[in-house]
Amino acid sequence: MHYAILAYHADDAFENWSEAEDAALMDDLLGINDRLVAEKHLGPAARLGPTEGARTLRGKSTGGSDMVVDGPFAETKEQLLGFYVVDYPSIDGAIEAAREMRRVNPTAIYEIRPVMLYLPGAKLAGGD
């Protein structure tokens, strides 16, 4: 089963890191990535850019076309910084992987959520 591990941080937590602090954290996280790859548990992973560069596509405006607005406008103090896709027989393995990430990055919040992968040409779960 595939699980997404979503990494959240408060804006002020990671924006104040020095380049050295960020590099040290990434070295620790890449060590976890390497282990997960060796154990064949890690799928795609990505670190997202800052929200200042993001755009949000919203439903139709009063003029009838979709609206594209600057950045996300979630009512939260944390923002999604990146994600991992892991493959474990149960959510317990994914939770343990997130715990390991949190040990090296204790200011992060990790959400673990089951995901379905949609692959070109593959049948969807429950499909004919």
Image: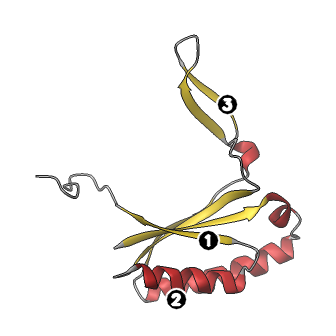
Q: Earlier in the sequence, mark 1 or mark 3?
A: 3
Helix, strand or loop under label 2: helix
The earlier-in-sequence mark between 2 and 1 is 2
Q: How far, Cα to Cα, is label 1 from label 3?
A: 27 Å
- Give me the C-alpha separation between circle 3 and circle 2: 39 Å
Disc number placed over residue 69 in the picture, else none: 3
Quadrant of the image occupied by residue 2: bottom left
Question: In the rendered image of this protein, does residue 58 appear above or below residue 45?
Answer: above
Q: Please indicate whether residue 117 sits to the left or right of residue 122 in the image.
A: right
Pointer 1: residues within 10 angstroms few (<14), some, or many (20+)?
many
- Residue 56: image quadrant is top right
Q: Residue at x 72, y 79 (%)?
A: 105
Name the residue tied to disc 1: 110
Q: Nearer the viewer, mark 2 or mark 1?
A: 1
Question: Which amino acid lies under the numbered mark 3 shown in the image of this protein?
Answer: Val
In the image: residue 116, left or right of residue 84: left
Please name the residue shown 70% across and 41% down the image.
Answer: 73
- Disc 1 marks a residue whose amino acid type is Tyr
Image spot of residue 24 (x, y percent): 77, 81
Using the rendered view, name the quadrant where residue 28 is placed. bottom right
**In the rendered structure, are the residues bearing label 1 and label 3 in contact, judged by CB atoms less than 8 Å apart?**
no
Residue found 71% across the figure and 85% down from its top: 104
Are there few (<14), some (14-19), or many (20+) residues within 10 Å of tag 3? few
